[in-house]
Image (tube, coloured by chain):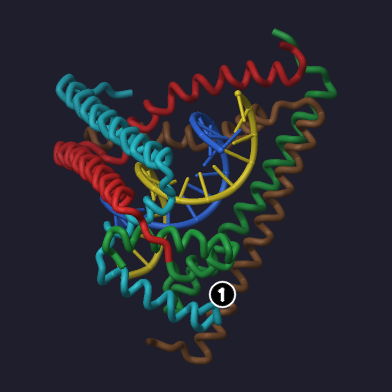
Chain colours: A cyan, B red, C green, D brown, E blue, F yellow
Amino acid sequence: MSELGANSKEQLKSIIDRVENVEAEIKTLSDDRSDIYKEAHGNGFDVKALKTIVRMRKQDPDKRAEQEAILDTYLHAMGMA
Amino acid sequence: MSELGANSKEQLKSIIDRVENVEAEIKTLSDDRSDIYKEAHGNGFDVKALKTIVRMRKQDPDKRAEQEAILDTYLHAMGMA
Amino acid sequence: MSELGANSKEQLKSIIDRVENVEAEIKTLSDDRSDIYKEAHGNGFDVKALKTIVRMRKQDPDKRAEQEAILDTYLHAMGMA
Amino acid sequence: MSELGANSKEQLKSIIDRVENVEAEIKTLSDDRSDIYKEAHGNGFDVKALKTIVRMRKQDPDKRAEQEAILDTYLHAMGMA
DNA sequence: ACACAAAGTTCGCGTC
DNA sequence: GACGCGAACTTTGTGT
C-alpha cells in the first residue's frame, strides 16, 4: 500500500486535531446547556416545555404559520379539531 | 388560564436567554467545523473519509470499554465470576 | 479463562438468534412505513404534518392538554401568545 | 381556512390507518423482543450484556465497510487511486 | 424520583 | 429538488 507524503500526513493530522478541538468545545457548551436545564428543573420549570419554547423561537414565523395551517387542515379532515 | 408571577417570569426569560446564548456559541463552533472541512476539501481531502476518521477515533475508547464490559458482565451472568 | 457449559452456549446462541430475527422483522416494517410516507409525499401530502397527526393520536388526551397548558403559560409569559 | 376534498380526505385517513397498522405490528415485535430478554433474564443471563452482543454484531459489518470506505476514499482523496 | 444509557425519530447537509 | 447519509434531539427504559 502507498504511503502518504510527509506534507499530506501533517495536513491530515492538523485537520483531525482542529476538528477534535472544536468538538471538545461543543461538548463543553452542550454540557453547560444541560446544566441550565437541570437548574431550571430544580426551580420547578418543565424542561420539555422550555425546550419547546427555544425551538419555536428558532423557527421562522412564516414557515411556522404555514406548517400550522397544513396541520390544521389535516386535523380538521380527520375530525380531530 | 394559569399566570406566572413576576419572579418566575423573569426567571423564565433568563433561562431562555442563557440557553439561546450557549446555543449561539455552539452554532459558531459548528460553523467553524464546517469551515475546516471546507478548507480540507479545497486541499483535496475527502470530507466523508475525514468525518469517518473522527467518528472512529471517538468510538474506539467506547468500543474497548464495551469489550471489557461484555466479558465482565457476561461471565458474571453465567456464574463464572 | 472459563468455558461456557454446552447448555448455556446453546441457550445463548438461541437468544441472540431470536432477537436478531425479530429485529429483522422490525426493520422490514419500518421500511414499509417509510414507503407509505414516500407514497403519500408523491400524492402531495406533507409528511411532517402526517407524522404529527400520528404522534398526536398516540398521546393520552389528558396528558396532552396538560402539556399544552404549561406551554401556553410559558408562551404567554414570554409574550409569544 | 383550507379544506380537503372528499378524495383527499379519504386518502388521508387511509395513510394514517396504514401507518398505525404497521406501527402496531412494530410494537408487537418490540414487545416480543422484550419478552425474549425477560425470559433470558429468568435463565440467569445478563440482559445488558446480551444487548451489547446484539449491538456489536450489528456494528461489526458497518465497521468493516467503514474501514474499506476509509481506504478507498481516502486514497482517492490523496491522489493515490 | 432521579440520573444515566439506549433506542428511535427528526433535522440538516451534501450529492446527484 | 429528491435522495441518502450522518448528526442531533427526544423519549423510553433501567438501575440506583
Residue A34 place in picture, x, y as percent: 37, 37
- Is residue B51 in sight in this rendering? no
- Is residue C47 in sight in this rendering? yes
Question: Which is nearer the eye, A1 or B49?
Answer: B49
Q: Quadrant of the C terminus of chain C?
A: bottom left
Q: Quadrant of the N terminus of chain C?
A: top right
Q: Is residue A66 left or right of residue B36?
A: right
Q: Which residue is drawn at 41% across and 54% down?
A: A49
Q: Residue at x 68, y 21 (%)?
A: B74
On screen, residue A58 above or below C43: above
Q: Which residue is drawn at 85% across and 24% down?
A: C7
Which residue lies under the disc numbered 1?
D15
Residue that sits furthest to the top in the current view: C1
Dot 1: chain letter: D
Residue B12 place in picture, x, y as percent: 31, 49
Please state which amino acid type lies under the numbered disc 1: Ile
Secondary structure beneath label 1: helix
On screen, residue B1 above or below C14: below
Q: Which residue is drawn at 22% across and 43% down?
A: B21
Residue B60 place in picture, x, y as percent: 43, 24
Residue A2 place in picture, x, y as percent: 29, 24
Residue that sits furthest to the bottom in the current view: D6
Question: Which is nearer the eye, B12 or B35?
Answer: B12
Q: Is residue F15 left or right of residue D41?
A: left
Q: For residue D78, which quarter of the picture?
A: top left
Q: In this view, does D7 lie to the left or right of A47?
A: right
On screen, residue B27 above or below C43: above
